[in-house]
Amino acid sequence: MIPIILLPMAYAGLRLVASATVGQKVDQKVGQKVDQGIDKSAATAVDQISRTLIVNLVEISINILLFIAFIYGSGMFFDFRTSLTMICSVYVGSLMYSICKVIKNFGFILILGRDYRLNLKRYIFEQIYHNVRSEAQQKFNGMGAIKRIVYKVSAGPGADTIALRVANGAMPLIWNRVSARLLAVSITVLLYILIFRLIVAPFLIQETAHFSLLQALLWPFAFSIDFFFHTTYSSWVASLS
């Protein structure tokens, strides 16, 4: 018989594969002109961030659909034990997946927290600025001596000026579009917690109706870990005030 712990491990593996497939990064390119640089920088940044947010949105939605299928299918297509096992597998698999993602992106998380104090807007601005400045400087370095002299005499903007103009121009475009996607993910996460409180929690145990928002978020993961590893984390979460 296949060890039961392989179920959440398989689910976590499938999510990693799906995430890698859907969330492939696009190449960063900046145009030669400032206006083109703004458009391309904004499009590239929005595309990359949107891919990440859409992946998260799809993953949360799939989890919700799985929970509903296992709960309402209990008694019709599955017995209670099978439904409970599958629900706990989804939670533990999601936890394993999240741990893998945190480890994989630990460098980025560390930089965002330590250097930017979790200020995503500032991080995006500086990434655009440094990328554009680097490419602009490469183009200047590739100019011939005469062309470089003519450019300086004509008071053409330097790499810093170009990068600043592109970053300032692109940032509002990026943030307006990203904010909408962040809001969609936030609403879906709240829906995720709400579905737990209204549907999943009563199915697992009746005494969860009084849980706070934090307890409602943590308890199903703790319960699922207890289910597989015979720990008592759910009792600890239930004791939080």
Image (cartoon, grey):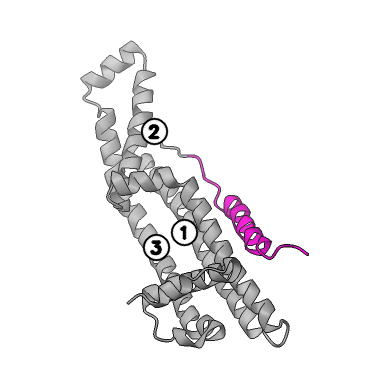
Residue type, numbered disc 3: Leu
Residue type, numbered disc 1: Leu
In percent of width and height, residue 96 lies at: 55, 58
Say which residue label 1 marks: 53
- Confirm whether residue 201 shows in the render: yes
Say which residue label 3 marks: 182
Query: Depth-wise, is mark 2 or mark 3 nearer the camera?
Result: 3
Residue displayed at 34% across by 25% down: 137
Residue displayed at 38% across by 41% down: 36
Mark 2–mark 1 Cα distance, whole angstroms, equals 29 Å
Residue displayed at 50% across by 40% down: 27
Answer left or right for 96 relative to 131.
right
Against 24, is 70 above or below?
Answer: below
Against 91, is 25 above or below?
Answer: above
Against 203, is 45 above or below?
Answer: above
* Viewer-proximal residue among 219 and 112: 219
Q: Residues within 10 Å of mark 2 (few under 14, many from 20)?
A: few
Furthest toward the top, the residue is 145
In percent of width and height, residue 50 lies at: 46, 56
Secondary structure at numbered mark 1: helix
Residue type, numbered disc 2: Gln
State which quarter of the image contains the C terminus: bottom left
Q: Residues within 10 Å of mark 3 (few under 14, many from 20)?
A: some
Say which residue label 2 marks: 32
Against 130, is 18 above or below?
Answer: below
Secondary structure at numbered mark 3: helix
Q: Quadrant of residue 156?
A: top left
Mark 3–mark 1 Cα distance, whole angstroms, equals 7 Å
Q: Residues within 10 Å of mark 1 (few under 14, many from 20)?
A: some
- Of labels 3 and 1, earlier in sequence is 1
